[in-house]
Amino acid sequence: NGTAMRFETLAIHAGPPRDPAFGAVMPPIYQVSTFAFQGVNQPGPFDYSRSGNPTRKALEDTLAALEGGGLGYAFATGMAAEATVLGLLSAGDRVLVHEDLYGGTWRLLTSVVARHGVTVDFADLRDPAAMAAALRPETRMVWIETVTNPLITVLDLPAIAAAARRHGALTVVDNTFLSPFFARPLDLGADVVIHSTTKYLNGHSDVVGGAAIARDPDLAKRIGFLQNAMGTCCGPFDAFLVLRGIRTLSLRMERHHANAVAVARWLAQHPRVAQVLHPSLPGHPQHALATRLYTGFGGTFSFRVKADAAGIARMLGAVRTFTLAESLGGVESLIEQPWTMTHASMDAAARVRAGITEDLVRVSIGLEHPDDLTADLNRALAAI
Ligand code: PLP
């Protein structure tokens, strides 16, 4: 009818038209490796599931619609999506990366990508002068997260993407923490959006998956070529689960955000808590920028505890409603210490330089009642 669908509607109706075979109201799982040719040299719309699969395509088209991209691709994990997009680079190229980021991305860059002749430069991209100084003639890609993991820094994405574009470099944005419900990096100048769909997009802690979405058709097709060439795609059953998760993304993100704000405010007044890193709090260093760029912040944030390593271990050992576990974005609340868990793959000096120290605790606030969560944190903080 010519009217663009709103996000909530797209999350439910984007993707392929209703199943032509039986009218199934949701895309069925095509759990197959290969498809019959219609004749010699006459493949059908799909020929082999690494190259394309109808269930994965339903997810990929939905991801593209939600991020406002031209084409989307779904991968086996977030790291598979990252490795594939980094496959756009060639020996001799440089990639510029904000220094506070997911430890697994740091490991991929420093111990895999760097061995293939790509130079990885880290800089503090909060500072435009530091970015300008770090852009070299060979810099082909700038890599950031919408909200950094684990320090919850919000970078000036439009300014960074504009500077990268003037330089002739692509901007890749990992939008895992906010999801397209709260952040649309392509609208702010990014060239490629990455996700660990393991997190909010799937939302139920029962899948690992990844995604990459691009608006420029040639760039998107290059990513599609690499997905097929590298074999990094996700399987049909995982695609089905992520797509099922996406149907409720809007509801979940609103509640994750509301619960996280309630818990962050409660923590901010606790005498054992030194600092709460949540963009919605007026004391957050990028509060104004964050609320201008994004409509909410999901459920993941960090805080600093006034305790030594043994005290923090006692605290993390005392939770009952929270689970001590890596990952984020599921219905259940998780708590972790980046120093020993999600960011242990980053060398100690790089962690300290970025500000990822032993007193930092990260939480993924789930969909439980917030009063049960603060009661659990109260008990844990008392155990210090
Ligand atoms: N990007 C971010 C921001 C993450 O937090 C993670 C995982 O924790 C990844 C990427 C990697 O995703 P996966 O674990 O699905 O490979």
Image (spheres, rainbow, N blue to C red):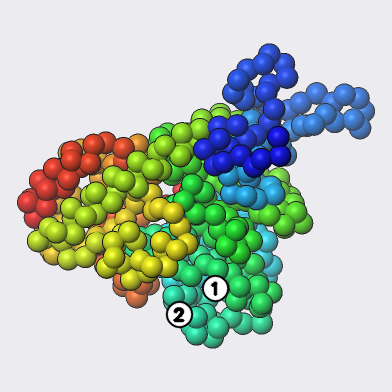
x then y, percent, for residue 178: 44, 52
Cα distance in 3D space between marks 1 and 2: 11 Å
Residue depicted at 17% across the width and 66% down the height: 274
Q: Nearer the viewer, residue 356 or 220?
A: 220
Residue 183 point in image, percent of width and height: 50, 54
Residue furthest right as drawn:
40
Question: Where residue 159 is drawn, which disc sits there?
Answer: 1
Kind of residue indicated by mark 1: Ala
Residue at (46, 51) in percent of width and height: 182
Circle 1 Cα neighbour tier, 10 Å, few/some/many (<14 / 14–19 / ≥20): few
Answer yes or no: do the residues labelled 1 and 2 have beta carbons within 8 Å? no
| The C terminus - image quarter | bottom left
Q: Which residue is mark 2?
A: 127
Place residue 45 in its image quadrant: top right
Q: Is residue 256 left or right of residue 99?
A: left
Instruction: Where is residue 179? Give x, y as percent.
Output: 48, 49
- Comparing marks 1 and 2, which lies closer to the viewer? 1
Which numbered circle lies on residue 58? Answer: none
Amino acid type at mark 2 = Asp
- Tell me if residue 231 comes above or below residue 58 in the rendering: below
Horizontal relation, residue 326 to residue 53: left or right: left
Q: Count how many numbered circles sit on residues in the image.
A: 2
- Give the image location of residue 119, x and y in percent: 58, 74
| Mark 2: few/some/many CA within 10 Å (<14, 14-19, 20+) | few
| Labels 1 and 2: the sequence-earlier one | 2
Is residue 157 or residue 50 the one in the foreground? 157
